[in-house]
Amino acid sequence: MKRYMGSWLPLLLCMTACSSGPPLRTFVLTPPLASTALAPTTASATDRILIRHVIVPDYLDTTDILLRDGTNEVKVNGTGRWDERLSQGLTRALAADLAARLPSEAVVLDTSSPAQQQVLITVNSLDLWPDGRCVLDATWTIVDHHAPRAVDGGSGTFDSPAIGSTTGVGDSRLVDAISGNVGKLADMIALNVRQRTDRSALQAP
């Protein structure tokens, strides 16, 4: 018996080493801080826009990168993962994108001080295919700190085309596809904020 175990042991070790594969790559949705620095938390409340935690479907709020596989199936990407839960990553990414698009405003994530406006964002769906196609559907509302209900908002569906074959593209390109659609969502929200600011300026005495 020991002789048989000895002959199989090298093969088992080889199979274990071969099946383990390379380590998972870890991704974030935000670029380096130097290029997307948010406003300091000491900014005046009249200048602050607070980005609330983004709401996503429960099945998406994980560190797994999920890919669409057929009509009703999703599968875990086996070579890459998120550094944090998707809802947290999207919140940081949208805040960074909005800070870049609204340089005259103080976009913040800190809730310890009051803000003139709050932006609430709900991602209704975020579908990513192995070929790099990405569809993001989201709604948002903007609330003034003194208003009991939402005063503005909108919705949008952002569809980026496939960038590779159906057999799959690299993980970095998958992340880029999501980041691109998050940027398009930030464009729409920033436009909404600027329109509100312009209307408020016109209505001011």
Image (cartoon, rainbow, N blue to C red):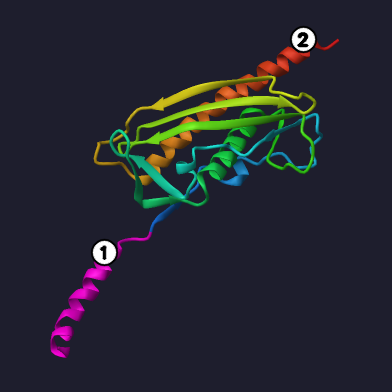
Which residue, as the protein is rendered here, is positioned at the far right? Answer: 205
In the displayed structure, would residue 161 be above or below residue 60? above
Q: From mark 1 to mark 2, how far is it between C-alphas?
A: 65 Å
Residue 19, given in percent of the width and then of the height, sits at 26, 64
- Name which residue type carries label 1: Ser
Task: Identify the secondary structure beneath mark 1.
Answer: helix
Identify the residue position indicated by label 1 in the image: 19
Residue 21 in magenta? Answer: yes
- The residue that appears at 17% across and 84% down in the rendered structure is 5
The first of marks 1 and 2 along the sequence is 1
Give residue 141's quadrant in the image. top right
- The residue that appears at 45% across and 32% down in the rendered structure is 125
Relative depth, front residue between 61 and 22: 61
Relative depth, front residue between 71 and 17: 71
Name the mark nearer the viewer: 1 or 2.
1
User: In the image, is 96 to the left or to the right of 135?
Assistant: right
The N terminus - image quarter = bottom left
Q: Is the residue marked by circle 1 packed among few (<14), some (14-19), or many (20+) residues within 10 Å?
A: few
* Number of marks in picture: 2
Most prominent secondary structure in the magenta stretch?
Answer: helix
Q: Residue 72's mark?
A: none
Identify the residue position indicated by label 2 in the image: 202
User: In the image, is 55 to the left or to the right of 9?
Assistant: right
Relative depth, front residue between 49 and 4: 4
- The residue that appears at 80% across and 26% down in the rendered structure is 146
Give the residues drawn in magenta, as a range: 1-23
Residue 144, given in percent of the width and then of the height, sits at 75, 25
Give residue 114's quadrant in the image. top right
